[in-house]
């Protein structure tokens, strides 16, 4: 039973355009969400997070949107750059789980020149 | 500026052998985690620690043991390796509530 789902295994986007990565969750107790980026042969690196009290958080080219009623969050990257090509993981946690992270399966983003 | 360091980076074992994976962090973090990542799946939590001398089970703890004798180190042990434990293992640490986890670069483990 996957509590965090990333339904697109891969996504291809033209350089300079917007990349939108999606994530759905089922547990209404999740109150903190994170996006991580992972290059091959490296560990995941933290990108951006959002608390359930907010519906948007922005950091430079990266914006995360949270729709609690739909149990959906998305990561927008504008403009997309070649260095953004990586696997992106969505993760969620809940206070009552001691903030253990539950991870999606990841989406491989490919930025085309 | 080491952050989280995992050793070894690669290892091949035979079924039934034992080994210990070492994770070291230099950020004075209280929380440490061991995950495994398998193809097509997200990271799954094996064990974690909320402070020196403490450990707790995660989502997939069977076949693994851990120890946190020093705050900066978190060890993951396989007592009798099985082919199903072939995976990439990641260690992470974090400082406090709602702080992001920082990851090492992983250990690729193959069990033949």
Image: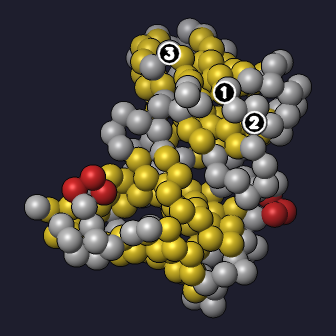
Mark before the other along the chain sequence, 3 or 1: 3
Q: Distance between the Cα atoms at labels 1 and 2?
A: 7 Å
Same chain under badges 2 and 3? The reply is: yes
The disc numbered 3 marks a residue on which chain?
A: B
Which SS class for mark 1? strand
Q: Distance between the Cα atoms at labels 3 and 1?
A: 15 Å
Same chain under badges 3 and 1? The reply is: yes
Can I make out residue A24 in this image? Answer: no
The location of residue A18, given as percent across then percent down, is 28, 76
Above/below status of B4 relative to A33: above
Above/below status of A72 relative to A98: below
Residue A46's tag is none
Residue A69 horizontal side relative to residue A13, left or right: right
Q: Nearer the viewer, residue B37 or A12?
A: A12
Residue under numbered circle 2: B29
Residue under numbered circle 1: B25
Residue under numbered circle 3: B8
The disc numbered 2 marks a residue on which chain?
A: B
Is label 2 or label 3 in front? 2
Tell me the residue at 56%/57% (across/down).
Answer: A103
Tell me the residue at 45%/20% (across/down).
Answer: B9
Labels 1 & 2 near each other (Cβ < 8 A): yes
The location of residue A68, given as percent across then percent down, is 63, 85
Tell me the residue at 62%/18% (across/down).
Answer: B22
């Amino acid at each position: 039973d996957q509590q965090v789902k990333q339904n697109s295994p891969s996504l291809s986007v033209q350089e300079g355009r917007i990349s939108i990565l999606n994530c759905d969750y089922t547990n209404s107790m999740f109150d903190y969400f994170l996006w991580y980026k992972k290059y091959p042969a490296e560990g995941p690196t933290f990108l951006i997070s959002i608390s359930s009290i907010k519906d948007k958080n922005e950091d430079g080219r990266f914006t995360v949107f949270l729709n609690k009623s739909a149990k959906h969050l998305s990561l927008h990257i504008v403009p997309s750059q070649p260095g953004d090509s990586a696997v992106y993981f969505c993760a969620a946690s809940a206070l009552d789980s001691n903030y253990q992270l539950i991870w999606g399966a990841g989406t491989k983003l490919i930025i085309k020149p | 500026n080491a952050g989280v360091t995992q050793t070894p980076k690669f290892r091949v074992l035979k079924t039934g052998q034992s080994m210990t994976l070492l994770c070291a962090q230099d950020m004075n973090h209280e929380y440490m985690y061991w995950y495994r990542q398998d193809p097509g799946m997200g990271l799954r939590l094996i064990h974690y620690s909320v402070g020196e001398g403490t450990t707790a089970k995660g989502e997939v703890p069977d076949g693994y043991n851990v120890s946190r004798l020093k705050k900066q180190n978190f060890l993951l042990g396989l007592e009798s390796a099985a082919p199903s434990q072939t995976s990439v293992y990641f260690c992470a640490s974090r400082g406090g509530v709602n702080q992001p986890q920082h990851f090492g670069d992983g250990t690729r483990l193959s069990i033949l």
